[in-house]
Amino acid sequence: MSALAAPAPASTPGGSPPPGDVQPKPTANSRRRIILGLTGFWLVGLIFFIGVLGFGSHKALDVRNGTFTPTNEFKLDTWFSVGPVNFNKGVLYVILAAVITLWLMIYAARRLKQRPGRLQAAIEMFYGMTSGMARENLDTTLSRKYFPLIATLFIFILVSNLIGYIPLPVNTLDKFSLFGARLPSFQIYAADTNLAFPLILSLLVFFLFSWERLKAHHGPIGFLKSLLPSGIEGPIKPMIFVIEVLSYFLRLISLTVRLWANLLAGHMLIAFMGGELGVLVGSAWVQWLLFPAGIIIYLFEAVLIAALQAFIFAILTAIYLGDAVASH
Amino acid sequence: MAPAAAHIPVAAASGSFLILPNIGLMVWVLVIFGIVMYVLSRSVFPQINAMLDRRAQMISNEIDSAESLRKEAQEVLDEYRQRLAEARTQADEIVTRARQAGEAHQKEAVESARAERERLLQQTRRDVEAETRRAIDEIRREVADLTVLATEKVTRKTLTDADQRRLVEEALSDLDFSVLGGGEG
């Protein structure tokens, strides 16, 4: 009791913390210094490029003759074919996503402990979140049935998105020379920037929630009736029905386009701000000017959009499945 | 910027692939996604679920155990308090009893001391009386002898025993020994 009731040691006259206390990091000053230094470096670089090269345009030959187009990097160049099966960078990214997802999950699953480490905590958080999505939107039976789909959609799309922010030498359409060898250019690419990736997953989800709706409402008539919200009477009924049918099919489009457009636009913005616009207009100073914006967009996309889009896709799947069996 | 941007080549024709899904990739995605989902649902999710169940069970057991321990501790504490109260009562009783015994003993000792003092006083008194009586007898004897001696010297004759006794008795009767006996002889 005496120890508990003992008064706290008086602070030292000089105001310095007592020994044993964690020293506050001098973050504010050093951060400000770093920001000022980087801003200064950026300004000096800008002045240098304008001073040396001027405002004039110095386009590369490939740009001038139209060989280089910024959208080319999203083109799926077939690398090789095995019978009717084509292999391109989209396929590589899907395989990479699958391998990384499986390796990560199996690695974590084999090392599960009662006291989780960081990876296990993250995996458990993912598991808890996706099982929560399933439980909150579906009944117990459907939740058990569709949890693997929802969880796999989330982790698979997340990994696909994240590896899309790692520059890899996959741009076989724009090669560069290194000691005489023509090598594919480095680029950031994600499989979801091709419409095929989100479309097939959306079609899968659309098919599944339509099938559940068909089962839950005992056939096509019940299916169509279920699209109409309850309490709608009178001449407005057919109009609402048409809107609801449209809205139902638009789920497929919205689910697809949301993921695809976000990723494609994100990647294009990063590429443009990261230097591509400067290449197109033939001005080094434009590249230098926009480069910080490229970094900021890159961080925004990699940190927020990648996880957010995976989350949205997974939760919308759960909501649509839940809505399919809910009675209006 | 504006004049420079005007030089950007418009790849409208070549950009159509952006909005056209690659059918081959769709098949790849469907197959690979199916494999990933199958593997995860067979060998990963059950393990994570089992582990979370085990942990939930462990936490539940720990809570039960903690509750049981708490109850046990409460019982021990109650028992301890009860015993402490009993011990206090007993201690109070012992102290009271000891105090009573002490007081009784003290009283007894005082009584005993008083009796002893009385006894010693009586004894002393008896001794003094005896000594006094003995001293008086001694003095009487001395006086008698002196009286006889003095009488012999005066009368120039030897007194018989009967005379001597008579004379002594006469002389002694004149003497007051009561002073020597402290008022008692």
Image (tube, coloured by chain):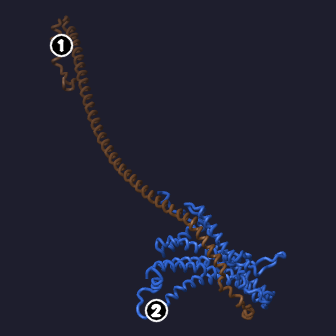
Chain colours: A blue, B brown
Q: Nearer the viewer, residue A133 or B149?
A: A133
Residue at 48% from the left image edge and 80% from the top image edge: A214
Residue A230 horizontal/vertical position (percent): 42, 86
Give the label on residue B168, or none: 1
Residue at 61% from the left image edge and 73% from the top image edge: B33
Residue A171 horizontal/vertical position (percent): 74, 79
Q: Label 2, label 1: how many angstroms apart (C-alpha)?
A: 172 Å
Residue B45 horizontal/vertical position (percent): 56, 66
Which element carries disc 1, helix, strand or loop? helix
The three-letter amino acid code for the residue at tag 2 is Pro
**In the depicted structure, whether residue B161 falls above or below residue B136:** above
- For disc 1, the neighbor class at 10 Å (few under 14, some 14 to 19, many from 20) is many
Which element carries disc 2, helix, strand or loop? helix
Classify residue A139 as left or right of residue B168: right
Q: Nearer the viewer, residue B170 or A167?
A: A167
Classify residue A292 as left or right of residue A111: right
- Chain that bears disc 2: A
- Chain that bears disc 1: B
The residue beneath circle 2 is A238
Q: Residue furthest right?
A: A180
Residue B21 seen in render: yes
The three-letter amino acid code for the residue at tag 1 is Val
Residues under numbered marks 2 and 1 in contact, where contact means CB atoms less than 8 Å apart: no
Of badges 2 and 1, nearer the viewer stands 2
- For disc 2, the neighbor class at 10 Å (few under 14, some 14 to 19, many from 20) is few
Instruction: Report the quarter where the C terminus of chain A lies.
Output: bottom left
Residue at 46% from the left image edge and 71% from the top image edge: A140
